[in-house]
Amino acid sequence: MSRLVVARRSLLLGSAAVALMPAMAFADGPDVGKPAPLFTAVDSNGKTWSLADLKGKVVVIETTNDGCPYVRKHYSAKNMQDQQREAAAKGVVWLTSASSAKGEQGYVTAEQANALTKSHDAAPAAVLLDPQSKIARAYGATVTPHMYIIDANGVLVYKGGIDSIPSSNVADIPKAKQYVRVALGEVLAGKPVTDSSTRAYGCTLKYPRTSS
Amino acid sequence: MKRLLALLLALIAFPAFGQSVVQTENVRAELLADVSAVKPGEPFWVGLRQTIRPKWHTYWKNPGDSGLPTEIAWKLPEGAKADPIVWPRPHLFDLSGVINYGFKDEATLLVRITPPANASGDFKLAAEANWLVCEDVCIPEDAKLELTLPVTATGAPAPPATRAIFDKARQLVPMQSPWPARYGVSKSGDPTLVVEAKGLKADTIRDVYFFPADWGPVASMAKQTASIGAEGIRIPLKRGDAKAALPADLSGTLTLTEKTAGGDVQQAFDVTAKLDPGFVPTASLAAAGEQLSLVEALLFAVLGGLILNLMPCVFPVLAMKAAAFARLAGHERSAMRRDGVAYTLGVLVSFAIMAAAVIAIRASVGDVSWGFQFQSPVFSLLIAYLFFVVGLNLSGVFEFSSRFAGVGQGLAARGGTAGAFFTGVLAVIVATPCTAPFMAAALGFALSQPAPQTVAVLLALGLGLALPYLVLSMTPALQRLMPRPGPWMDRLRQFLAFPMYASAVWMIWVLTQQTGADGVIYALGGMILIAFAIWLLKLGSGASAATWVRRGLAAVAVLLAFAAALKLEDGPATAASASGGPAAGVNFDGWERFSRARMNEAVAAGKPVFVDFTAAWCITCLVNERVALETQAVRNAFEQAGVVKLKGDWTNRDPEITSSLKELGRAGVPLYLFWAPGAAQPKILPQVLTESLILSELAALPQAKR
């Protein structure tokens, strides 16, 4: 690929271009099996979290947007909270990332985030405030909830949906395969994750508007 | 009375049931059937018509990066069967980089229903539909819809207004691709799709996009840059997130916009591409070209211009001027600046003239589609030759005559701003012997670009050439840093030959990707011939008989080298037509060839005449043939009405057809004419045909005398 770029340029400029070729890199969602992108973010209680500091621990990232019917599906059924508690009990660090841009649905202030955690009786290790969608961007998140699991070595081992039935219907939760729960079990047992990349479903992640 | 009351009660008690229309917050959903009475055992179509709130969208079967497709759960009378939804062609929505596939404004999802052979009484269709509708926020909505149709022995079609809705909906359903398709996987794991639509014209087709039918194999978030070439439509894709191996068949919907004489026409095709293990795509040059954004191209052009300054012919000019600056130390700074700006303008004007010439040449060649070159082996070979010759020149094997160098000297000798301006012009001319090969390469690139890019790239090249002088005139202190002219210039020039040779080698490699190993023989053989020709020409001068013999031989050698190009053109073309693609020609089955005489004769004889002006590269023409002109019903109707069917093949711009089109005020195809018997003027039909349109046109004819 890169060689071809060189050739077209050399076509343009003759020899000049052969020696001079800028490295072009486009940010893309990370692949499973590759190191998870590092990030640093402040949570709703003012604490700073850095993924680099969490080496040695299994980390779950959950993108959220309280206005999204798919997020609500899993919170109203307590599915998300149950999994947060199970994870915490096993020493997993569960980070909920509020990645909606300011002015968009799902954007929360620290107080609002804490109020939501309380009203939902949620139990994440922290709710990260990500109003510039930096974490979401780094992980290539497209929806809420979009789920990621990072193993103790900092390698991304799961990305995708919370479960296998893409619907907003609460009644589907018991019928669905809970991908994250299953994957976490495999990771903690030191096994490779069977379904390591699944289709995430939900509302479009509310990134900052690039153009009107 | 009692019954009426019960009915009223039922209506009040179950407002959500028994309705064929439901208005939710963001969508009006309506259940329609293309029949008003059902015939037992005979399939009919129902449509879920969504009228969507402006700016909101619902989703296609593959919703893309987020969203969910509309679902319909049917409750049908015993023994009846509902097929899966037939989807209209999707649109792409870009939500700050998250790509969604779906529908805006209005979408009719079609479902074929097959009633049982023993159906009787009332046929009740109940549908529970749910969909996600999004603008920035998403709202799941649902509706319970019901439609009851009587069952009669013969059935009955729906009223015309409803049929029109179905006609429109069917027009939006992608057509089965008339071309075979295949896909290959690159070493990096990314798939590339090739739809073997051969002989298309790249400049009339745009907005090509492949909507993958399923999540997984193809990433919807990645930009697609399709190219159109001799092999057809090539779309490099990015692999999706599914961990499974890529499927044996990659399916999806290909959409494109074709520019026709009557305006833009959007087309959609369902494509199923077979995995071709032998096809390991290396990004095509065209694809690489797309990566070279205009900004980068400009940047490199400036850089290329800068390097031109180091060429032995240009550098002395620059050095002389710089030395003049040094002597003028203490001279008015503003005068120097004016000088620099004038010089720059001189260079830029020369380049602008060159750009204008390039564009004029291209316009005069006109019909040539430049998009093709980078996938054409001939082009690769010629560029390899060019690199080789440039390399030989840099190595000092031969020199271009510097006859031009004297021109303009007089003008440049003038003092002041005008003098500086002409020095700029002179620099360009003087530089010709050294820069000609470079310029040829740059022009080659420029030719492949649209006019504004051509101008921009050439001007950037000129700016690069003028830049050192401009900078020196602005900051004379810098001139101390300038290297002095000397033998190093020749050494640099000779050194630069090697990257040129390397580029030639690389082009040959590209060539082998396009033609196979045989390409090497032709390319290297051609290079030997070219080198031989140069040697012959250098042997002597004068007008002796021996010189003429040598010149003749050289010409033969060069001709042979270029004959290799023709040989290459042959190869892949025959291979392609043998690979089972549709013949890249117009099909005359059942049609007579158009000629004005034949048309006038048939019209004069009082026969109905249908004229189809078409071309092999016209997608809209092909689609019209498939969906309207060549359906069984239309063929029969044509025959019954005794229509004289004439087809004009404009693939190669037949002049008789061109003049006929011009008379009708059209610049191209498709164009459909219908002469009713005895009519003084033909009726021009729309450029997008439907079966019903042709049938109604024929039905309006007085019964043919048979």
Image (spheres, coloured by chain):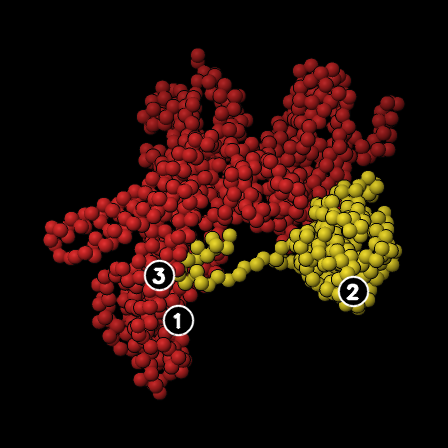
Give the spatial CA distance, label 1 vs label 2. Answer: 52 Å
> Which amino acid type is shown beneath numbered disc 1?
Leu
> Which amino acid type is shown beneath numbered disc 3?
Ala
Q: Which image quarter holds the C terminus of chain A?
A: bottom right
Residue B94: image x %, image y %?
Answer: 62, 51
Query: Label 2 near label 3: C-beta < 8 Å?
Result: no
Residue lying farthest to the left in this orientation = B544
Residue occupied by mark 1? B467
What's the chain of the residue with tag 2?
A: A
Residue occupied by mark 3? B497
Give the spatial CA distance, label 3 vs label 1. Answer: 24 Å
Label 3 CA crowd tier, 10 Å (few <14, some 14–19, many 20+): many
Letter of the red chain = B
Residue A207: image x %, image y %?
Answer: 68, 57
> Which amino acid type is shown beneath numbered disc 2?
Asp
Report whether mark 1 lies on the same chain as mark 2: no
Letter of the yellow chain = A
Judge from the rendering whether residue B13 lies leftward or rightward of residue B581; answer left or right. Answer: right
Q: Residue at x 75, y 62 (%)?
A: A55
The numbered mark, 3 or 1, whose residue comes first in the sequence reads 1
Q: The residue tagged with tag 2: helix, strand or loop?
A: strand
